Image: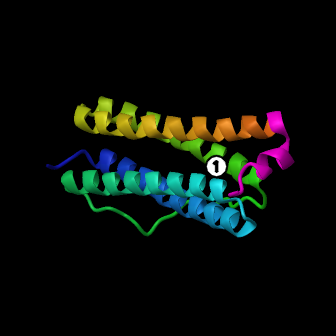
Amino acid sequence: MKSDPKIIDKLNYLLAGELTAINQYIVHAEMCEDWGYEKLHEHFEKRAISEMKHAERLIGRILFLDGRPKVDTLNKIYIGQDVPEMLKNDHEAEANTIKDYNDAIVLAAEVKDHATRDFLQEILNDEDKHIDDIEGLQDQIDQMSLQVFLSTQTEE
């Protein structure tokens, strides 16, 4: 099914964001594992897998719309040097992603591609959950102190 080129371009833009997020979250996961924070490792890894599924879905949608997925483009990756910086960087990335998906949903509605709009809304719902999870961890750090929080992230 041939689609409006603006939709294909926007889907490829979103794909670059998802591919970037995968890399950022995997590095954060591995850093946390190296530091002995297994629960945080699992948290970041789970989020990376979710982003992989988003990338897979975007690739599928681009192909369905007779576009060519562009997988050779990444945005700048922001690796945190400690857990609070990781969460800050991830929060900023998710906030930008949410804005990008909202913009894409508006574009899809403008070109009357309601199936793509609905498809994007599903991913946006996941992204909302991601930012909520990050904010939950940031709140725990604020309430417990960083040291106490990190002591809860190791396996016993």
**Where does residue 31 sit, x and y in percent of width and height?**
69, 66
Q: Which residues are magenta?
A: 143-156
Residue 57 among those drawn in magenta? no
- Residue type at mark 1 is Asp
At x 78%, y 58%, the residue is: 82
**Where does residue 15 sit, x and y in percent of width and height?**
42, 55
Mark 1 Cα-neighbour bin, 10 Å: few <14, some 14–19, many ≥20:
many
Q: Is residue 93 left or right of residue 56?
A: right
Q: Quadrant of residue 137?
A: top right
**Where does residue 74 sit, x and y in percent of width and height?**
51, 63
Asked whether 13 or 17 is in front, the reply is: 17
Task: Give the residue furthest to the front.
Answer: 156
Asked whether 72 or 41 is in front, the reply is: 41
Q: Secondary structure at mark 1?
A: helix
At x 14%, y 49%, the residue is: 1
Residue topped by disc 1: 90
At x 55%, y 64%, the residue is: 23
Asked whether 123 or 132 is in front, the reply is: 132
